[in-house]
Image (cartoon, grey):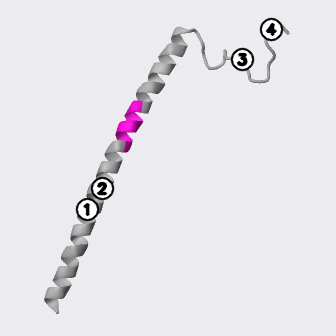
Amino acid sequence: MHEERLIEIEIKLTRQEDLVDELNKTIFRQQQRIDDLSAIIAELARRLAEAGIQGNEMMPINEKPPHY
């Protein structure tokens, strides 16, 4: 009886360890993706700054171009 219970606990522990490993891998991949996206955003912000475009200077969507 005690041996069966011990085996069940060991099986559950092994499954939990596997799950924790998978979750760690997932979190690692997500962090890599976040870092990649942060670098892309920083590069886009740099390019916009170089082009002289600031957040408030962009033409609103509904505004007609000057030649109308």
Tell me where residue 64 appears, x and y as whole percent. Answer: 81, 16
Q: Quadrant of residue 20?
A: bottom left
Q: Height in image: 32 above or below 65? A: below
Q: Over which residues does the magenta segment extend?
A: 30-36
Instruction: List the residue tagged with mark 4.
Output: 66
Instruction: List the residue tagged with mark 1.
Output: 18
Q: How many marks?
A: 4
Tell me where residue 62 appears, x and y as whole percent. Answer: 79, 23
Q: Secondary structure at mark 2?
A: helix
Q: Amino acid at mark 3?
A: Met
Q: Height in image: 30 above or below 47? A: below
Q: Residue at x 30, y 55 (%)?
A: 22
Tag 2–tag 1 contact (CB < 8 Å): yes
Q: Measure the alpha-carbon separation of dots 2 and 3.
A: 46 Å
Q: Measure the alpha-carbon separation of dots 2 and 1.
A: 6 Å
Tell me where residue 1 appears, x and y as whole percent. Answer: 17, 93
Instruction: List the residue tagged with mark 2.
Output: 22
| Picture quarter with the C terminus | top right
